[in-house]
Amino acid sequence: MTDDTPYPPRSSPIHGRGAASRPDGRFEQWQRARFDDGWTAEEEANLPKTELIVDTTKSVIVEARSPDIPFELSINPYRGCEHGCSYCFARPTHSYLGYSAGLDFETKILWKPDAPEILRSELARPHYRCRPIALGINTDAWQPIERKLGLTRRLLEVLCETRHPVSIVTKGALIERDVDLLADMARDSLVQVMFSITTLERELARSMEPRAATPARRLEAMRTLHEAGVPVGVLFAPLIPALNDHEMEVVLQASQQAGATSAGYVLLRLPHELAALFPEWLQQHVPGRAEHVLSVLRQMHGGQVYDSRFGQRMKGSGVFAEFYRKRFALAVERLGLNLDRESLNCAAFRPPRSASPQADLFD
């Protein structure tokens, strides 16, 4: 069978990957099943490799319409993510592209080589209204392939040149490479960087987030940016009941010591295919906790493992949700976080200069 075959759960995890299967996308006309033909061991030895695919969409800036997220515009340099986080809420978006939310999401990475040029033209439109752009929210803009391609760096250069405000969420220590641009933007209150830290336990991070920077490296990168004058914060995300929830306070404290001045948390979200993929991961890596995790999630979502309603999906409801909310509030107050969250500056924005030298004569 080829590498595109939809794998069932394997007897052992795939080294360096978060998903253990490649289920067909929910928009496909049929769903395939596989049987054991005796070649399993040979198939498992052929580990899936990352494939780069050119993204042919014609725009870069996406307008967000969800009322429970703190931004209106976003840019995602990549679709799919090599970090391979087993819990990633963005996995189901790969189904819209005709790929699997499982292994395809972390091995078939779409990128747009001309994204910086498209961004420049979009910012130059006469009626463009400057609002903070969230960079790399759906998938990480500083994932491993960025080291080779440098696409995020080029986008950030355009935003820096035009003095356009940007908010960032990442779990990639590679962001240290761009500290020169980020420090420049920070001087005009144009940037805010949030580091997603799920756990401080190295082995748990290795299995949940196999190709992301270790928790210690993320804290080191946070400190580097903080010392360069870049405002940094921490997202304890996702909060997974009965798995990492006991670490909330220690993650917040370690981040505050590394320079974080703001914090947030998000409950584990299991939309669409993730409702099967993450329990698959639980059974492979922490089988003794699997049912406990899912049971608490159901209690927080009215009997289901996920409730997609705005306002409900991020935090849940009920006794457990209130318990987490109070713990977070007490920790934030004790550590002095979220006291002064400066708004990003939109007044400094200047449209990019025309690519035509003749047009510049009229500036």
Image: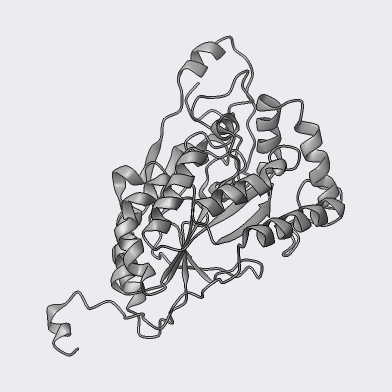
Q: From this viewpoint, which residue is outermost toward the top?
A: 38
Up-down relation of residue 245 to residue 279 (above or below): below
Q: Is residue 191 visible?
A: yes
Is 272 on the left-hand or right-hand side of 153?
right
Residue at horizontal 16%, vertical 77%?
356
Q: Is residue 54 visible?
A: no
Up-down relation of residue 112 to residue 209 (above or below): below
Residue at horizontal 45%, vertical 52%?
222
Colouring of the image:
one colour
Counting from the top left corner in percent of width and height, residue 325 is at 76, 57
Is 71 on the left-hand or right-hand side of 286?
left
Locate the C terminus and report the quarter of the image it occupies: bottom left
Counting from the top left corner in percent of width and height, residue 25 is at 60, 42
162, 41: nearer the viewer: 162
> Image quadrant of residue 289?
top right
Residue at horizontal 13%, vertical 87%?
361
